[in-house]
Image (cartoon, grey):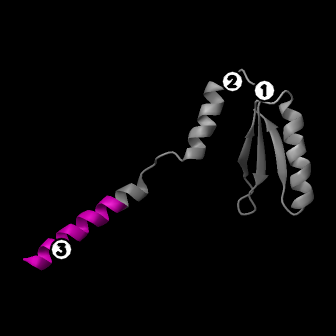
Amino acid sequence: MYKSSLVITLLFVFSFLLTGCLSEEKSATDNLIEFVDTEMQDEDKYWFKMKNRLDGSWNPVILIFGYADNKSACNFLLEYAEQTSPDVMFSCDEI
């Protein structure tokens, strides 16, 4: 009796964990990107991005907004990043 209850409990826990792992919930980054794209359309803003070495995609790292000149703020970060990490590619992309 004890073994069958334990097996049923373990199967339930495993199936619960498996469905949680397979769920397609958005990450916090995805939610932020969607918010920026939909809710901040009237603002001058830039993504400071870094190129992923594994798959070549550009990943947003820092959202630049709220400065008098957001492009200059992003370019300042870009210059600093290129000096400190010359083997990594960075960019400033206007949104």
Instruction: Identify the residue at horizontal 60%, vertical 35% (top origin).
Output: 34
Residue 28 lies in quadrant:
top right
Q: Amino acid at mark 3?
A: Leu
Q: Amino acid at mark 1?
A: Asp
Separation (CA) of disc 3 from disc 1: 58 Å
- Read off the magenta span: 1-17
Q: Are marks 2 and 1 in contact (CB under 8 Å)?
A: no
| Residue 85 disc label | none
Dot 2 falls on a residue whose secondary structure is loop
CA neighbours of label 3 inside 10 A, class few (<14), some (14 to 19), many (20+): few
Task: Count the labels in the image.
Answer: 3
Of the residues under marks 3 and 1, which one precedes in the sequence?
Answer: 3
Dot 1 falls on a residue whose secondary structure is loop
Q: Which residue is mark 2?
A: 41
Q: As drawn, is 54 to the left or to the right of 21?
A: right
Query: Quadrant of the image for the C terminus?
Result: top right
- Magenta: main secondary structure equals helix
Residue 37 lies in quadrant:
top right
Dot 3 falls on a residue whose secondary structure is helix
Q: Which residue is mark 1?
A: 44
| Residue 6 disc label | 3
Q: As drawn, is 11 to the left or to the right of 36?
A: left
Q: Amino acid at mark 2?
A: Gln
